[in-house]
Image (tube, rainbow, N blue to C red):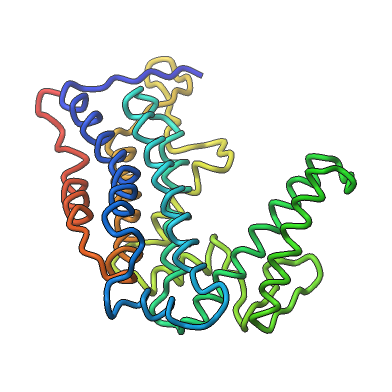
Amino acid sequence: MPYSLTVPPSWKPALEEMAELLGQPRRLLGEVEDRFRWIPAEGSLAESDLGTTMELRGRPRENASMYLRVGSDHLAGVAALFRATELLFSPAALCRVTFEHVVRAVLALDPGVTAEERIARAVLDDVVSAYFSRLAVKELVEGDKQTAAFRQADSRWRAIKKAAEASFAASWAGNAPYDWEVGGHRYLRIDDPAVEEWRRLRAAVPAVGFYAALSLYTHPQSLPEELHTDEGTKAPVLTTDLDFVATCAMNALVCWIDGARVLCCEYHGWEVPELDEIAAAARLYPPPKARDD
């Protein structure tokens, strides 16, 4: 199917500038770690959580930081696509994965629940994560449970379940991980419950609509929005809407910044002014189209 992309003159520097912005989260995470050494500010929620005597009390922030690190890597991937002008379908798919990780990071540190509940949620995340890792390995080895790879994945999953049971009332209902419970909490699937819960916590972001739009790019679509009919030949052609791609990328970046604020500022009590600076810069894009384009 024919596809051609013309990048107007006004967009060429803008793509490079957006790519630079999209690469900043990963660099900033390293700088923040060096600056604060993961030491919570006095009176912060993190200090309170880490002051409990519960086992696994560090898991909420460890999980949140991992989710944000992975999200920053995906944003860096979008940056690479922008520099290569690979702008048709891939950027939006990476933006969706970034958003999913941000949602998980924010839920992990929900200030509206107790420290014990945050830990329970984190442990449940670990159990479900280990379960799906085990399941994937099982499929890869075609069900051969005697392989070293499967035994390692199975042992890891069972050890995490045991750690959960040592601290919380836990229920493992068959092989249905979305029905499992740790400390009275069930795992929130990312499609509806998790996004809705995240919207409750971060009400200023149109989470559901943004996620629905991004989800179109991770499932096969016979009639994607980028498909049009050439008026002359009447043949189907694919085109890129630069405004849409840029908006997706900048929204994903701002969502990541929001998640990083939760981890760094709201949970640990640190001052990280760079987050506001990146967010302000992101709001300048996509750029107004030049009159001569």
Q: Residue placed farthest to the left in the image?
A: 291
Residue at 62% of width from left, 82% of height from top? 183
Q: Is residue 60 above or below residue 247?
A: below
**Nearer-the-camera pick, 221 or 52:** 52
| Residue 4 quadrant | top left
> Residue 200 at what x, y percent from top left?
39, 74
Q: Is residue 149 left or right of residue 192?
A: right
> Residue 8 at what x, y percent from top left?
21, 22
Residue at 34% of width from left, 20% of height from top? 5
Q: Is residue 99 above or below residue 19?
A: below
Q: Is residue 33 above or below residue 159?
A: above
> Residue 20 at what x, y percent from top left?
25, 35
**Nearer-the-camera pick, 149 or 254:** 149
Q: Is residue 31 left or right of residue 215?
A: left
**Nearer-the-camera pick, 41 or 217:** 41
> Residue 107 at what x, y percent from top left?
45, 69
Q: Is residue 259 above or below residue 40?
A: above
| Residue 228 quadrant | top left
**Nearer-the-camera pick, 198 or 290:** 198
Residue at 10% of width from left, 23% of height from top? 292
Q: Image quadrant for the C terminus? A: top left
